[in-house]
């Protein structure tokens, strides 16, 4: 192979540049000087080997002027092979760490993992504590300075009030109050910050102005107190003292204003640092989490093979494969001991499984018997929860009513306050009464609050009376939420439907060891069809399986009379709820509760 003609000097230089930059072209496809290389003219190759040999022998002798012998032809540039990339030091370090980790016993792995976790958590906790201390210390100084200024200002105002009271009425009591106020003011002024380096020149100067002015004021005040107020010139001195008090109050106002401004400026200066703490904590936590996750992955990979074999054996055991061969692993460490223990447990489990199945059957039988015994208690609990349910948030309403009641007291709105208190009492009773039985007096009180609200709504159209016939209602226990639904039913479906309104009365009497509670109204009453339909619904509500068989229907009836009717018949064996009505004349509901026996 040879060049046919001598290449020009410029082209030879280009070839040398190409050879020297072959590695750069191999790597990035462009020479070092950034210029694109123009492809060299292809070299003419002799297809016939004989002609090529003859040409090499006679080339030098017969070469025309300007031609080079074949042996002087520069070799064609060879493409350089891709050099292997040097191994990163990071990769080498990780390889060594991984080898060291795999060689560690399991105990040491756990210790290292736990230690790393504790160190990470301790570092996170330390950073949190530091951030909290930094923010607390930064704001505590600001709040302390403002609090002391405000305390001194209020103390001066109290001293001024005490002095005026003493001037108008010089008694031992006003004198003692004045001395206490003076002592409080002196202590408050003494606690004002006065460090020049901490509070600055202006606040320090105003603080000392207050102290000097108060000392002068104190001398004048003490001299005026020791002299007779009625002497000539005392009145003028008194008014001068009042002026000094006004100046001092203005000094305190100015000092408090400057202190607030200084505190705001100080807080604005540290706000960027405080604001960056959460982001730093998030970044730090992410790094700690990444470290823990990485270490967890390495820990898992070091133990995955024996654990996987053991997991496969466990799956076969779950499917009943107790006859499978024992698990065999090469580990002689803790995992090997675990596998051996598993093999022994597998043989023992086959012997014990029949006993466990028999125990399970006995447990299910006992559990079913327990469910049968508690079905009545569950029904009663369901009813109680239904009564406590509300379509709105009762806590929000209760708190709001208390707030409105407080505003009504401030505005001297007695009627509004009484109505709100009555409604609050009803909500309080619904919220905090979780017992199944309450005293009859509580039920009557809630019913009274409800009727008071209805009377305020309907005015003279509605009257309400309670008659107990000397019965001690505090000693009589009745089911919770017994009277108010019945009275509400009498108002809404009986009295209010009459144009002229009517009367609702509640009476209590004892007869033959039973409590008779009667709620009577002179409203519109019920027709025969309506009365029969009502009694049919009440009988359905009293059946034991009603709640489970028809929960929606039970909820519909349970809001009013059906709920009370059902509970009376489930709690008392001889309890009764009698309804007497006549269309156009009213309705009377009598509840009979035996006091000597209950079914709970």
Image (cartoon, grey):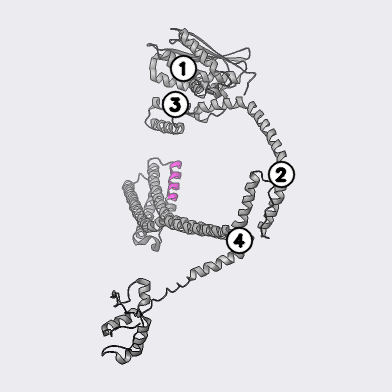
Label 1: state its secondary structure.
helix
Cα separation, mark 4 vs mark 3, equals: 66 Å
Sequence-wise first label, 3 or 1: 3
Q: Are marks 3 and 1 in contact (CB under 8 Å)?
A: no
Magenta span covers which residues?
170-184
Our reading of the magenta stretch's main secondary structure is helix
Q: Which residue in the structure is indicated by mark 2?
A: 350
Mark 4 and mark 1 lie on one chain; the one further toward the N terminus is 4
* Residue 48 part of the magenta segment: no
Residue bearing the label numbered 3 = 423
| Quarter of image, res 331 | bottom right
Tell me if 566 is positioned left or right of 168 in this view: right
Q: Which residue is mark 4?
A: 109
Can you give x and y, in whole percent of width and height, for residue 33 in the image?
30, 77
Residue at position x 57%, y 18% in the image: 543
Residue drawn at x 42%, y 22% as measured from the top left: 453
311, 459: nearer the viewer:
311
Asked if residue 7 lies left or right of residue 326, the reply is: left
Question: Who comes first in sequence, dot 3 or dot 2?
Answer: 2
Given residues 436 and 307, the one toward you in this image is 307
Q: Position of residue 242 (x, y in %)?
A: 33, 47
Question: Which of these two is toward me, 204 or 568?
Answer: 568
Specify the label residue 230 is tagged with.
none
Q: From mark 3 to mark 2, how far is it between C-alphas?
A: 67 Å
**Structural crowding at the residue carrying mark 4, measured as other residues with C-alpha within 10 Å and reported as few (<14), some (14–19) or many (≥20):** some
Q: Residues within 10 Å of mark 1 (few under 14, many from 20)?
A: few
Q: Which residue is mark 1?
A: 489
Mark positioned earlier in the residue sequence (2 or 4)? 4
Mark-to-mark CA distance, 3 and 1: 18 Å
- Crowding around mark 3 (Cα neighbors within 10 Å: few <14, some 14 to 19, many 20+) is many
Query: Callout 2: few (<14), some (14-19), or many (20+) C-alpha neighbours within 10 Å?
Result: some
Lower position in the chain sequence, tag 4 or tag 3 = 4
């Amino acid at each position: 192979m040879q060049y046919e003609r001598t290449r020009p000097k410029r082209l030879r230089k280009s070839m040398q540049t190409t050879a020297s930059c072959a590695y750069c072209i191999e790597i990035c496809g462009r020479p070092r000087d950034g210029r694109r290389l123009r492809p060299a003219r292809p070299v003419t190759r002799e297809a016939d080997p004989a002609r090529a040999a003859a040409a090499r022998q006679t080339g030098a002798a017969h070469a025309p002027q300007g031609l080079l012998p074949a042996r002087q032809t520069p070799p064609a540039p060879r493409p350089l092979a891709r050099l292997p990339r040097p191994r990163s030091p990071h990769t080498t370090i990780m390889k060594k760490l991984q080898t060291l980790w795999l060689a560690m016993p399991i105990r040491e792995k756990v210790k290292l993992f736990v230690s790393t976790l504790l160190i990470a958590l301790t570092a996170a906790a330390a950073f949190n504590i530091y951030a909290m201390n930094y923010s607390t210390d930064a704001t505590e100084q600001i709040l302390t300075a403002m609090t002391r200024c405000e305390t001194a200002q209020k103390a001066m105002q109290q001293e001024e009030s005490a002095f005026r009271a003493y001037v108008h009425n010089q008694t031992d009591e006003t004198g003692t109050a004045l001395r206490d106020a003076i002592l409080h003011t002196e202590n408050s002024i003494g606690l004002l910050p006065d460090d020049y380096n901490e509070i600055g020149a202006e606040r320090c100067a105003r603080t000392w102005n207050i102290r000097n002015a108060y000392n002068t004021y104190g001398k004048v005040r003490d001299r005026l107190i020791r002299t007779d107020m009625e002497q000539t010139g005392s009145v003028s001195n008194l008014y001068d003292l009042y002026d000094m008090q006004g100046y001092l109050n203005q000094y305190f106002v100015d000092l408090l204003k400057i202190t607030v401004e200084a505190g705001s400026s100080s807080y604005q200066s540290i706000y960027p640092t405080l604001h960056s703490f959460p982001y730093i904590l998030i970044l730090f936590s992410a790094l700690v989490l990444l470290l823990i996750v990485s270490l967890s992955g390495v820990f898992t990979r070091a133990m995955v093979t024996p654990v996987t074999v053991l997991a496969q054996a466990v799956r076969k055991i779950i499917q009943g494969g107790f006859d499978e061969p024992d698990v065999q692993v090469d580990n002689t460490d803790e995992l090997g001991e675990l596998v051996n223990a598993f093999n022994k447990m597998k043989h023992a489990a086959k012997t014990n499984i029949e006993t466990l199945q028999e125990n399970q059957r006995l447990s299910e039988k006992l559990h079913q018997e327990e469910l049968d015994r508690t079905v009545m208690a569950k029904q009663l609990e369901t009813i109680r929860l239904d009564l406590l349910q509300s379509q709105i948030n009762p806590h929000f309403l209760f708190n709001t009513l208390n707030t409105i009641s407080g505003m009504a007291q401030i505005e001297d709105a007695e009627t509004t306050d009484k109505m709100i208190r009555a409604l609050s009492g009803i909500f309080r009773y619904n919220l905090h009464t979780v017992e199944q039985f309450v005293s009859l007096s509580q039920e009557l009180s809630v019913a009274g609050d409800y009727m008071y609200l209805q009377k305020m709504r309907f005015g003279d159209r509605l009257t309400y009376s309670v008659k107990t016939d000397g019965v001690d209602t505090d000693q009589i226990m009745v089911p919770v939420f017994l009277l108010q639904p019945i009275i509400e039913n009498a108002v809404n479906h009986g009295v209010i439907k009459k144009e002229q309104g009517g009367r609702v009365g509640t009476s209590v009497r004892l007869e033959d060891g039973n409590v008779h509670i009667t709620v009577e109204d002179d409203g519109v009453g019920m027709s025969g069809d309506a009365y029969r339909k009502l009694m049919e619904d009440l009988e359905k509500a009293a059946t034991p399986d009603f709640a489970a068989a028809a929960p929606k229907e039970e909820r519909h009836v349970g809001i009013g009379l059906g709920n009370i009717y059902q509970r009376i018949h489930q709690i008392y064996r001889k309890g009764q709820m009698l309804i007497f009505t006549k269309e156009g004349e009213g309705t009377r509901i009598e509840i009979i509760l035996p006091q000597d026996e209950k079914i709970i």
